[in-house]
Amino acid sequence: MSSITHSTRSSNLADILERVLDKGIVIAGDITIALADVELLQIRIRLLVASVDKAEQIGINWWRTDPMFSTSGQELQQLRAENEELRHRLAQLEAKLDNNTG
């Protein structure tokens, strides 16, 4: 009779991952490069690891409007481009009006 053994390490890792995704974890750090007490460069690193559900619970949902992750984000990007084009055309028309009346 052969027995099957399971690794407790993998189940512990799965439990830890489940807890991290359920609760979320934040890792933060700052890197500053200075020369003679003059700050030359500052890098701030913030990392949040959580499930999508948990992220949405705490108000993080950037992927909904990011054009790389959603079609609605692509539509939003197209609308912004169209809006910018219309603003430019409006400015041109207003300039023509000012020239004609001035």
Image (cartoon, rainbow, N blue to C red):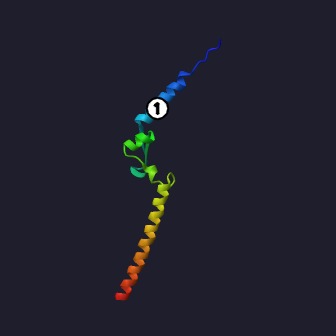
Q: Residues within 10 Å of mark 1 (few under 14, many from 20)?
A: some
Residue 18 placed where, x, y %? 46, 32
Q: Quadrant of residue 85?
A: bottom left
Three-letter code, disc 1: Glu
Q: Residue at x 40, y 83 (%)?
A: 96
- Screen quadrant of the N terminus: top right
- 27 shown above or below 89: above
- 55 shown above or below 7: below
- 27 shown above or below 67: above
Which residue is farthest right? 1
Q: Residue at x 40, y 76 (%)?
A: 91
Q: Quadrant of residue 26?
A: top left
Which residue is farthest left? 102
Q: Residue tagged by mark 1?
A: 18
- Screen quadrant of the C terminus: bottom left
Q: Quadrant of residue 97?
A: bottom left
Q: As rendered, which of 23 and 41 lies closer to the eye?
A: 23
**SS for dot 1:** helix
User: In the rendered view, does 4 fall on the left or right side of 74?
Assistant: right
Q: Residue at x 47, y 28 (%)?
A: 15
Residue 40 placed where, x, y %? 43, 53
Residue 78 placed where, x, y %? 48, 63
Q: As rendered, which of 27 and 21 lies closer to the eye?
A: 21
